[in-house]
Image (cartoon, grey):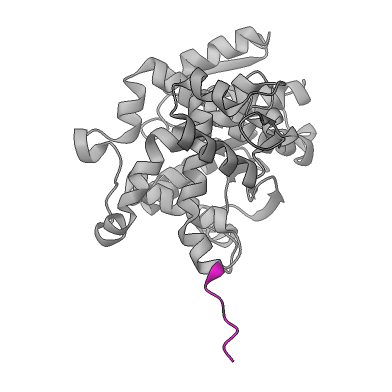
Amino acid sequence: MNRLSPDRIMGIGAGYCAAKVLQSAVGLGLFTELGDREMTAEAIAERFGLVLRPATDFLDALVSLDLLARNGDGPGAGYRNTEETAHFLDETSPAYQGGLLKIWDQRNYRFWADLTEALQTGKPQNEVKQTGRPMFESLYADPRRLEVFMSAMDSASSRNIELLAERFPFERYRSLCDVGGASGLLSRIVARAHPHLECVSWDLPAVTEIAQHKLAEEGLGDRVRAVSGDFLADPLPVADIITMGQILHDWNLEHKQRLIAKAYEALPEDGAFIVVETLIDDARRENTSGLMMSLNMLIEFGDAFDYSAADFRKWCSAAGFRSFDVIPLAAGSSAAVAYK
């Protein structure tokens, strides 16, 4: 008797349905509208301009996914946030994570429909297909869109940076430069945790302006500097620690090796080079998040890819680094460290 079941396979295949239900709920602002109250399906449909019958299916699908709770049955039932969605998907919560889900809904969801084409051609499948402009060029040309993107990346990255600030021995060093520092998140979190450090957030001018505003808001303007530079064209600033958060995976192998060599040159003896990435496990069997992220780099950039700690060690050894470490973080992410 054949006891094999197709259920797991079909569940993966239908995963796009659950993803879109969640993304649509976040895009509508449903979890924020509910806040700490209950609303009926009719009230929700009226609030968001939805057709009541499919809206009820939509809301009950969220209940079945444990993304909403429901009090009662039938037309009078009240829908409310779960503890989890109230914490992470209500925009008034300090722990809000919906920004990245909105980006996945508005951008990535549609581009991933062309994954097969990306695999066959090795070419990106994002805005560049319609406009001829690469992702970052399009992003940096729209200040509002850039700020929304940075905010979403901050919310997705903050827990990893907090763990890095706890787990890496920053007390042994005096200065840090975060290359591709975006809004200055890494520098801000590390500077708060380790007041002795001199920190620089280094990125292109359009992004540096956002970082300067964030630093001023948090009262860190006198302890952390946001400095403009181009890490592909310019030498990196000299510091005891060079960090790159979600930077190396944006590039092909040649650019990865060039950035590693630049980090080596900018560090003193015993300096540390830290990358924060969704590292693929060395055997390439377990970290699905890292492998999916690598496919996302294909969708976005064509020849970019994520990598393992073993890959990082190999490239950094070739540049001259002498020893290595991996610090586990959250949600499949890690900090890989190379010491000069």
Residue 116's x, y, as percent? 31, 59
**Of 97 and 183, the residue lying toward us:** 97
In the image, residue 2 lies in the stretch drawn in magenta: yes
Residue 85's x, y, as percent? 67, 33
What kind of secondary structure does the magenta stretch mostly adopt? Answer: loop
Q: In the picture shown, does residue 255 fall above or below 101?
A: below
Residue 61's x, y, as percent? 57, 44
Q: Which residue is at 40% across, 33% downward?
A: 106
Residue 288's x, y, as percent? 56, 58
In the picture provided, is 55 more to the left or to the right than 131? right
Q: Which residue is at 69% across, 24% downward?
A: 38
Residue stretch rendered in magenta on the structure: 1-7
**Residue 261 in view here:** no
Q: Quadrant of the N terminus?
A: bottom right
**Of 110 and 273, the residue lying toward us:** 110
Disc tally is 0
**Of 105 and 246, the residue lying toward us:** 105
Q: Which residue is at 65% across, 33% downward?
A: 240
Q: In the picture shown, does residue 17 fall above or below 145?
A: below
Q: Which residue is at 59% across, 36% downward?
A: 243
**Residue 275 in view here:** yes
